[in-house]
Image (spheres, rainbow, N blue to C red):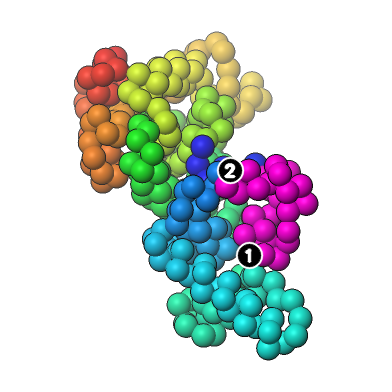
Amino acid sequence: MSLHHEFRQLEDQGIDLVEILGQDEYLRNPADLQAILDRLRERGGELYSEVLFFLTHRRFSPDRASELWQSILDNKKEMESKLGRRVCFRVAAADYLHDQTGILEGVRLLSRVEMDNLLGYVNVDDVTSVFTRRFFNDALVSEIHRARRYGHPLSLLVIDLDNFKEINDKFGHLEGDNALRQAGRLLRQSTRQNDIVCRFGGDEFAILLPESGNSEAFSLADRIRKALGRVLIKSSAVEGKKLLDEDQDSDSVPLSASIGGATYPSDCDSSEDLLRLADQRCLEAKRLGKDQIRLGAGSGFF
């Protein structure tokens, strides 16, 4: 499980790791929470890299994040000594990262609610309700780093809707948006909580599959391909319906997708090669007649 998702699960339980790790709040249930912290601290600098990213939306290397975290804690103690009162970690971080070192210019550390609202606006595509390409770029690097560190596989699927131009030309861009929205919803429903679904381009999607090899990626790709094939896009003007109809007729266009995929480390050894290979295989599926899947030799080809 990624640190991002572990943080979210702990937050759902009312546990604020920033306050605990920053020594603002002490363990209310020492035995249980200490076990959680011990497990997370095994991740070393990666833990502090993720927490600082959560606070500042700026990515630091694990080693640099560990150094900064300790410096902020030292600054927190110094500020408390000078002021004669408690200083919260977020204030000490803003003072150190902005006022003292200038590492972050114009920084304002946000509350949890503010951060959730901001990240939802920045990182989620407003049409499809999946993550944006910008979020995907960061997640790809982070997940490759995690896969390499813990020896887990990481798979990537690139999904290109085959008939999107026809839908736009026949029904207009509003129905095109409806098709994208339907595809995004289907992808979210088809994937696990830890999988990362993104809008990769205009009519392209990408899915990062942590701890999944070629065979698991192929199984998911085949489920997605079949599910998309059951969706018919119809103009909202036809019989007053907006999007989905089980009965195909001359006024509907079926969705289908060309899917390419690759897996680290069996297919490649870097994030750049993982993306390049998955994208190439998606183009190959498109050239070979669409509505097809192309993955590595370990999973077979469709």
Circle 1: residue type: Gly
Front residue of this view, candidates 190 and 233: 190
Give the alpha-carbon distance from disc 2 to disc 1, as whole Å.
Answer: 17 Å
Direction from residue 302 to residue 138 in the image, left or right: right
Q: Mark 2 Cα within 10 Å, few/some/many (few <14, many 20+)?
A: some
Dot 2 falls on a residue whose secondary structure is helix
- The residue tagged 1 is 22
Single out the residue that lies furthest toward the top: 247
Circle 2: residue type: Glu
Residue at 64 percent across and 70 percent down: it is 90
Q: In this view, does 189 lie above or below 31?
A: above
Residue at 66 percent across and 25 percent down: it is 240
Q: x and y percent of residue 143 in the render? A: 40, 43
Q: In this view, does 263 lie above or below 273?
A: above
Front residue of this view, candidates 211 and 286: 211
- The residue tagged 2 is 6
Residue span colored magenta: 10-38
Residue at 45 percent across and 68 percent down: it is 67
Single out the residue that lies furthest toward the front: 31
